[in-house]
Image: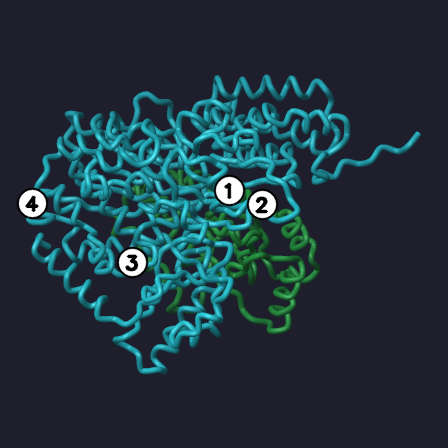
């Protein structure tokens, strides 16, 4: 493909869409499909056909519209509204008008769920069918790759990413530009670009939603990275548990190859780049970068000590750039609109937006995207609509099994990479579980420890044995069988794991314990005394004497 | 587990051929082991020991390495699935919404003899917790009653299960 063909494809598709009377986009990612979104789409397509409206009204699938708890969601291009809880029986009203039918389940752009958001990664939701490359091109897709391949030098691309201040969205927040520079400057001849799509945190579905909803954005970001660091081969390492994301990536790669947007001589330049998909097989530890690389090489996903870091020695010993899905999804916008544009959004030290998967005891659960540094109160209370009536907010858990909880006292703290560690939590990759007074924090700590225990790869002793010991203590606590000495042992083991584990899994495994100990020690003490304040743990009542 | 499970004539040949082609496509490279195991499991439903040995020979890997990889990853099965499969999500949101109770209920249910029951990690539909995946289809906001109805439905119909993949 050449620049002219790209522009032509874009204009043709835009004209075609402008000629339509209506374009109805049915949310087609995992959440809404579980709620019956597939049936809604089929019913709509049938109704369009029955009315002879083909060519005037188009029904498409699209990326996550956000409000997963009220799915299936459908958005209308003509009315610019999103409709919630749509059933196949609503088809007629959607096509013939009949807004009355959707009273109480219509969400306009000024609905509190959307008003507080700033959609950048998810900007194409409702506009782009993830299975049609023309849709992505019509929204300006692959223009950034054209610019990167024909009008910018690799060093200029790296400089632009550095200027944006973008920090890695996998959780640790390492500046992306610095990582890119390390790989680009390495003298080795073979380099690789790897997209970490092994999103294994329970309660996190940001990356899979991006891949299911707008896969070309990620491919474009990876190709730009390939150009910037001098790599010819990229890999996406996706979770085996996300069959839909895998299918969408496969389709997108095939389309991009057919259009010459991946492969040799991209945009008639000397730049060539291939992307292959690698599918994980259900090992949480493979989210750790060295374990992920081992898995791509067909081995057990066991981490190795760092340094050397992957930018120096990665895949097959070659310098390797690893970023997560959301990081790559930011890249086309940075190249297209400039690093300074992104730097102006969000917090000064953590620019851009962040996608959160909001779930748990919250009225409106789903996928939300806000500028980095937005307060937890805005996310949970305004966008999420607060906890359901009759309950009281207790804490929000971020960062999954590696993260911590944020109690009510810190609701107004900005959510960014530098503030959260200060209160014993972390930004994490974006999972955000809201907990109310019916949640037992000791049980939550036990839940995450059980997760880490199961997922420990077994290579280093502190993690392999330590998680078992810590889980044993937490289980005794939730059963009312713990002794006072268990508490000091729990804290000592936490310290041990944090100081001596080999990789991030073991190093971070104590975080949920330490964080709940810090903010909810009273609950631990209550359990020691044989009482669960939330009434969740089944502690036997002692016989009255 | 002495032989690779076989179905009637042509289907058997085809599966073996597909697997051979998949290995050839990866130039019989050991790097592709996980890809090959995925393909094999898709074809056979699980990974029988003789099949693992065959893969080891073709990819020129020690059998210990192949078995090591097959047992390391949760999604690989060394035993065949039953007629139906149910995966109860135990991600944070589903756990908080009562996933454990659903799992226990399912395991102890007298009508679950035909079902392979397992727990799964977050399936990414947290807004609809708790989630149970029955024969590859996700059920949202599951209650004990809903599960009961689902089990009865299959029992009454006597339908055949499909391989949920995992």
The cyan-coloured chain is labelled: A
* The colour assigned to chain B within the rendered structure: green
> Which residue in the protein does label 2 denote?
A387
Are both tags, 3 and 2, on one chain?
yes
* Label 2 close to label 1 by CB (< 8 Å): yes
The chain identifier of the residue carrying mark 3 reads: A
Q: Residues within 10 Å of mark 2 (few under 14, many from 20)?
A: many
In the displayed structure image, the side of residue A474 where residue A273 appears, left or right: left
- For the point 45% across and 44% down, which residue is it? A357
Determine which of the numbered discs, if any, sits on residue A95 in the image.
none
In the displayed structure image, the side of residue A73 where residue A56 appears, left or right: left
Quadrant in the picture for residue A189: top left
Q: Residues within 10 Å of mark 3 (few under 14, many from 20)?
A: many
Location of residue A74 in the rendering, given as x and y in whole percent from the top left corner? 41, 63
> Which residue in the protein does label 4 denote?
A269
Q: Is residue A243 visible?
A: no
In the displayed structure image, the side of residue A307 where residue B89 appears, left or right: right
Mark positioned earlier in the residue sequence (2 or 1) = 1
> Which residue in the protein does label 1 denote?
A380
The chain identifier of the residue carrying mark 4 reads: A
Location of residue B87 in the rendering, given as x and y in whole percent from the top left corner? 55, 53
Q: Mark 3 and mark 4: span between their CA atoms? A: 28 Å
Q: Secondary structure at mark 1?
A: helix
Q: Nearer the viewer, residue A329 or A193?
A: A329
Location of residue A458 in the rendering, given as x and y in whole percent from the top left corner? 49, 30
Q: Residues within 10 Å of mark 1 (few under 14, many from 20)?
A: many
Q: Is residue A131 visible?
A: yes
Q: Secondary structure at mark 3?
A: loop
Q: Secondary structure at mark 2?
A: loop
Are both tags, 4 and 2, on one chain?
yes
Q: Secondary structure at mark 4?
A: loop
Of labels 3 and 4, the one closer to you: 3
């Amino acid at each position: 493909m050449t620049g002219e063909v790209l522009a032509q494809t874009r204009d043709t598709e835009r004209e075609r869409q402008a000629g339509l009377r209506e374009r109805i986009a049915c949310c087609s990612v995992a959440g809404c499909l579980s709620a019956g979104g597939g049936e809604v789409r089929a019913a709509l397509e049938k109704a369009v056909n029955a009315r002879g409206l083909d060519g005037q009204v188009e029904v498409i699938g699209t990326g996550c519209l956000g409000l997963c708890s009220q799915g299936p969601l459908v958005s209308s291009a003509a009315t610019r509204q999103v409709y919630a809880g749509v059933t196949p029986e609503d088809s007629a009203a959607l096509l013939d008008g009949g807004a009355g039918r959707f009273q109480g389940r219509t969400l306009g752009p000024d609905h509190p769920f959307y008003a507080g958001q700033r959609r950048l990664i998810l900007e194409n939701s409702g506009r782009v069918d993830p299975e049609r490359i023309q849709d992505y091109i019509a929204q300006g897709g692959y223009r950034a790759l054209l610019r990167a391949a024909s009008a910018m030098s690799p060093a200029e691309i790296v400089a632009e990413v550095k200027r944006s201040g973008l920090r890695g969205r996998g959780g640790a927040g390492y500046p992306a530009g610095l990582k890119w520079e390390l790989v680009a400057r390495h003298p080795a001849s073979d380099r690789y670009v790897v997209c970490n799509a092994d999103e294994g945190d329970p309660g996190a579905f940001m990356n899979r939603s991006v891949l299911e909803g707008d896969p070309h954005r990620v491919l474009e970001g990876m190709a730009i990275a390939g150009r910037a660091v001098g790599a010819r081969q990229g890999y996406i390492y996706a979770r085996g548990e996300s069959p839909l994301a895998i299918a969408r990536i496969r389709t997108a790669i095939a389309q991009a190859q057919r259009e010459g947007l991946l492969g040799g001589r991209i945009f008639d330049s000397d730049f060539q780049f291939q992307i292959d998909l690698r599918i994980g097989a259900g090992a949480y530890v493979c989210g750790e970068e060295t374990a992920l690389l081992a898995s791509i090489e067909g081995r057990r996903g066991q981490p190795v000590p760092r340094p050397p870091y992957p930018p120096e020695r990665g895949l097959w010993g070659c310098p390797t750039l690893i970023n997560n899905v959301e990081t790559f999804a930011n890249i086309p916008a940075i190249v297209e609109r400039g690093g300074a544009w992104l730097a102006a959004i969000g917090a000064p030290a953590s620019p851009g937006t962040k996608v959160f998967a909001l779930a748990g005891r919250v009225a409106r659960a789903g996928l939300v995207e806000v500028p980095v540094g937005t307060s937890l109160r805005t996310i949970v209370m305004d966008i999420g609509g607060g906890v359901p009536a009759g309950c009281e907010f207790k804490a929000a858990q971020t960062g999954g099994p590696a993260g911590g909880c944020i109690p009510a006292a810190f609701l107004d703290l900005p959510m960014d990479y530098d503030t959260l560690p200060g209160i014993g939590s972390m930004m994490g990759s974006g999972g955000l579980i809201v907990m109310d007074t019916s949640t037992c924090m000791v049980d939550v700590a036990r839940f995450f420890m059980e997760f880490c225990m199961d997922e420990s790869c077994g290579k280093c002793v502190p993690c392999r044995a330590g998680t078992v010991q810590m889980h044993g203590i937490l289980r005794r606590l939730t059963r009312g069988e713990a002794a006072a000495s268990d508490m000091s042992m729990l804290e000592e083991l936490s310290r041990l794991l944090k100081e001596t584990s080999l990789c991030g899994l073991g190093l971070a495994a104590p975080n949920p314990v330490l964080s709940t100990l810090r903010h909810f020690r009273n609950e631990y003490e209550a359990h020691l005394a044989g009482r669960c304040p939330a009434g969740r743990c089944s502690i036997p009542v002692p016989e009255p004497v | 587990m002495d032989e690779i499970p076989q179905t009637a004539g042509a289907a058997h040949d085809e599966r073996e051929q597909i697997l051979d082609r998949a290995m050839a496509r990866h130039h019989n490279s050991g790097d592709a082991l996980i890809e090959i195991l995925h393909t094999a499991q898709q074809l056979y439903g699980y990974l029988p020991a003789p099949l693992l040995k065959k893969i080891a020979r073709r990819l020129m890997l020690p059998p210990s390495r192949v078995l090591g990889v097959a047992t390391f990853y949760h999604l690989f099965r060394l035993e065949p699935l039953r007629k139906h499969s149910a995966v109860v999500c135990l991600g944070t949101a589903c756990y908080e919404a009562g996933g454990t109770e659903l799992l226990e209920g399912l395991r102890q249910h007298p009508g679950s003899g035909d079902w392979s029951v397992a727990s799964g990690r977050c399936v990414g539909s947290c807004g609809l917790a708790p989630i149970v995946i029955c024969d590859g289809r996700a059920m949202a906001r599951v209650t004990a009653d809903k599960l009961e109805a689902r089990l009865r439905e299959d029992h009454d119909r006597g339908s055949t299960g499909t391989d949920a993949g995992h």
